[in-house]
Amino acid sequence: MSGEFPGITLPVVGFSAFSGTGKTTLLKQLLPMLTQHGLRVGMVKHAHHNFDIDKPGKDSYELRKAGAAQMLVASARRWALMVDNEVENDPDLGDLLRHLDLDELDLILVEGFKHVAFTKIELHRPSLGHPLLFREDPSIIAIASDEKMDSGELPLLDINRPEEIADFINNLVKP
């Protein structure tokens, strides 16, 4: 599981699914459970749109728009680094992972990047009518679904039992 990205020795586990399947909802349930397992978890989320966490009128926004290639905003409780990319291509997941403080983490979870080959759990709801991804993606190691289904050789997890998925991930990280 580690070694999929040069220089990254931590386990990286992705959640791959079509939009509307419930990736973010599940991750919001999983994160506190994994933390209770004693894991320090980093998170990378792929956004498909031209998003901005800064708001027009704020000093940091105005300074970034004035020409700062990187803008770091800090307070006593948090900090954020905003970097404008020159290219319109999707970001490289390996490059993004290297921006995390890896010494402070035990595990990195990734939402999205379903077309990148790395360890992933597929989330699937048959009622949405989307095809299964695992048949075309050999990096998928388990399927979490809300219905019984043929998962081939892969473990089938219950998407509505996040504690089951948290235990599966914990066993991957701390066998």
Image (cartoon, rainbow, N blue to C red):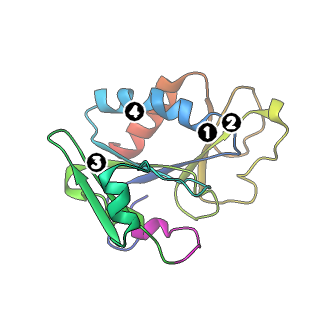
How far across and how far down the image is residue 27, in percent? 49, 35
**In the image, residue 93 lies in the stretch drawn in magenta:** yes
- First-in-chain label (1 vs 2): 2
Q: Identify the magenta region.
A: 87-95
Residue with the most extreme right position: 129
Q: Is residue 49 above or below residue 124?
A: below
* Separation of marks 1 and 2 at Cα, in angstroms: 19 Å
Left or right, 70 with respect to 120, comes to left
Residue named by callout 2: 21
Tag 3's secondary structure? loop
Tag 1's secondary structure? loop
- First-in-chain label (1 vs 4): 4
Answer few, some or many: residues within 10 Å of disc 2's Cα (few below 14, many 20 plus, some between 14 and 19).
Answer: some
Q: Amino acid at mark 4?
A: Leu
Q: Nearer the viewer, mark 1 or mark 4?
A: 4
How far across and how far down the image is residue 135, in percent? 75, 55
- First-in-chain label (3 vs 4): 4
Q: Nearer the viewer, mark 1 or mark 2?
A: 2
Q: Amino acid at mark 1?
A: Pro
Residue named by callout 4: 31
Work out whether residue 48 or residue 131 is closer to the camera in this orientation and state it.
48
Q: Amino acid at mark 2?
A: Thr
Q: Is residue 103 above or below residue 117?
A: above
